[in-house]
Image: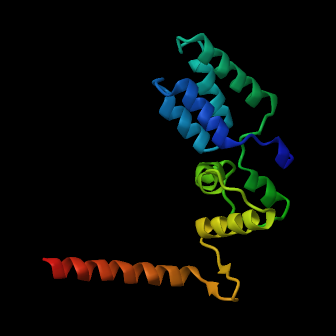
Amino acid sequence: MPIWMYIDRFHVAREIRDCLKDHPRYRTIQKKLALFDEHGLLTELHSAVGTLGEEKKEKQLEGLIQRIESMPGCLSDYRKWLREKGIDTTGMRPMGSAEGTMHVFAKRVKDGRSWCETGIQAFLHVMVAVKDGLTIQTRRGEIVIEEEKRETKRFTLVKKAVKNAEQR
């Protein structure tokens, strides 16, 4: 299946939560989605139809089921498809995982600020690198390595512990 035929799992999870948050089968449905079990997910979603008690939620659930059924395999792990094409997927995240951190980008990028194209690109590259623990090269050519950050964190923790011990 071409990569464009996959459904963004973040939005599917959000739609399931909107419809079924208080449903007794909600946790089971979440697990089926997390395990890429499309058949099991559809079975669970079909079993929930008619049990929601709200017309709006029923229609939303039916629409979700229809979208999933119209593209068999759309909730599969896209990394499997890429591996079959001979592409190394080491370090790649499942679809939708970036959506969970989008609020961080939005908060820092928006809030009434205006950015030039170059500035926003640089900012986003650094944010992604920090989130993924990648190496960042600064203007002066310095390289900030993940290990250096861990050392700094350890130093800070030790410093706090010493300070707390002195206060006692």
- Judged left or right of residue 167, residue 88 is right
Residue 160, percent from left and from top: 30, 77
Q: Position of residue 64 (x, y in %)?
A: 69, 26
> Residue at the bottom extreme?
141
Front-lying residue, 168 or 71: 168
- Return the residue nearer the eye: 32 or 12: 12
| Residue at point 67%, 82% (across, down) | 138
Q: Which picture quadrant has residue 135?
A: bottom right
Q: Position of residue 1 (x, y in %)?
A: 85, 45
Quadrant in the picture for residue 125: bottom right
Q: How many marks?
A: 0
Q: Looking at the image, can residue 148 be seen?
A: yes
Q: Quadrant of the C terminus?
A: bottom left
On screen, 151 above or below 28? below
Residue in the foreground of this view, choosing between 119 and 1: 119
Residue closest to the eye, 29 or 128: 128
